[in-house]
Amino acid sequence: MIDDVDMRILRILQRSPRAPFRLIGEVIGVSEQTAARRCQALRRSGAMRVVGLVDPAVHGEAQWVARIRCRPDRAVPLADALARRPDIAYASIASGGSEIICVVRSPLHAPREDMLLQQLPRSAAVLDLSIDLLIHPFGSPGTAGWTGFGGHLTPEQEERLTTGPAPAPAGPLLPLTTQDGPLLDALAEDGRTSHTRLAEVTGWSKGRVARRLESLEASGTLSYDIDLLPEHLGFHLNATLWMRVAPAALARTGQEIAGHEEVAFAAATSGDHNLLAIVICRDAEDFYRYLTTRLAATPGVDAYGVSIRVRRLKQAASLISHGRLVPPSPG
């Protein structure tokens, strides 16, 4: 059973994914051993994973968001097949089981016929397909996404975690080598993997591991995130909002919506709807409250549509299997 201590641990990991167990314990007033045990229990239960992520731009990839309208009896097999692909970063079934929403990584300059999603209309399951470019994610570096689950920290506790605002990545992105493979694979499996363990899997010294991590992190090539499964925390409604915003208001409106505690992700996109947001709420009434208060009070939104998720299959760094977050299968 997840309690307030667990919630505060999750909040700390959102702010500082690689915070030592000693610091986590000091901030919330428990022992280092208790902090370690609670973190490990949350991970084993599949409620959360801390992961290391490589910026797709390192490989020359852009992110495209697709809405695939398909036959309800064929949606699940198609969505499962998409979720298993390494070039798919997010996948869910929405709209009563007749729509798949996914994010695919593909180079901007790739020939149109080579793009995965351009091949989908050949499937008998697909009735309609729309693809838009994810142009710009909103939110500042080092800030958490969805924070509506609670676990709020006091100003003093927040101060213990940081000495100031998280610095923006210095850039430019660094090219990766084959030698980086074991390091990045280990962090994709567990973003909290220790320097000692990383030295073992790479065959490097701990000093070399620390220097390489510092370079990758400072350039923005490597970042850390925490995947959460909201259902474990009592939040059972997940919706994608497709909004129309005047170009002059897009930056301000997108940044404001990204700061809502109910919002897990917000980004500018191409297409008829130029702002996308993923919203997580406890139930339908909670979602209604969000639409009629927080969203309604946000200037700039001219119109919106809603897709309600009925099944989550993949998040940015995790598959969802039997109600648990698990690492994606390789290859």
Image (cartoon, helix red, strand yellow):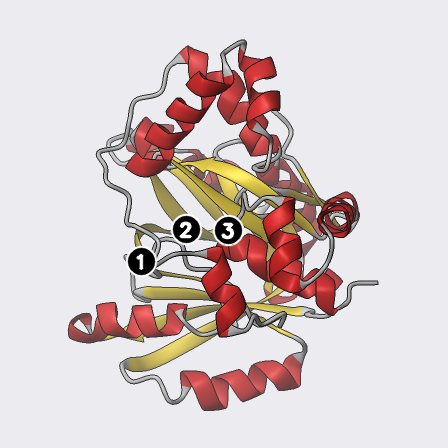
The answer to whether residue 77 is above or below residue 296 is above
Give the residue type at disc 1.
Thr
Residue at which label 1 appears: 269
Residue at which label 2 appears: 65
Give the residue type at disc 3.
Ser
**Residue 55 drawn at (x, y percent):** 37, 37
Residues at marks 2 and 3, CA–CA distance in whole angstroms: 28 Å
Tell me if I can see residue 121 in this picture. yes
Residue at which label 3 appears: 16
Q: Residue at x 36, y 72 (%)?
A: 243
Q: Secondary structure at mark 2?
A: strand
Q: Nearer the viewer, residue 223 or 23?
A: 23
Q: Earlier in the sequence, mark 1 or mark 3?
A: 3
The answer to whether residue 235 is above or below residue 160 is below
Q: Residue at x 44, y 34 (%)?
A: 116
Give the residue type at disc 2.
Val
Pointers 2 and 1 in contact (CB under 8 A)? yes
Q: Residue at x 28, y 26 (%)?
A: 174
Q: Residues within 10 Å of mark 1 (few under 14, many from 20)?
A: many
Q: Residue at x 50, y 51 (%)?
A: 16
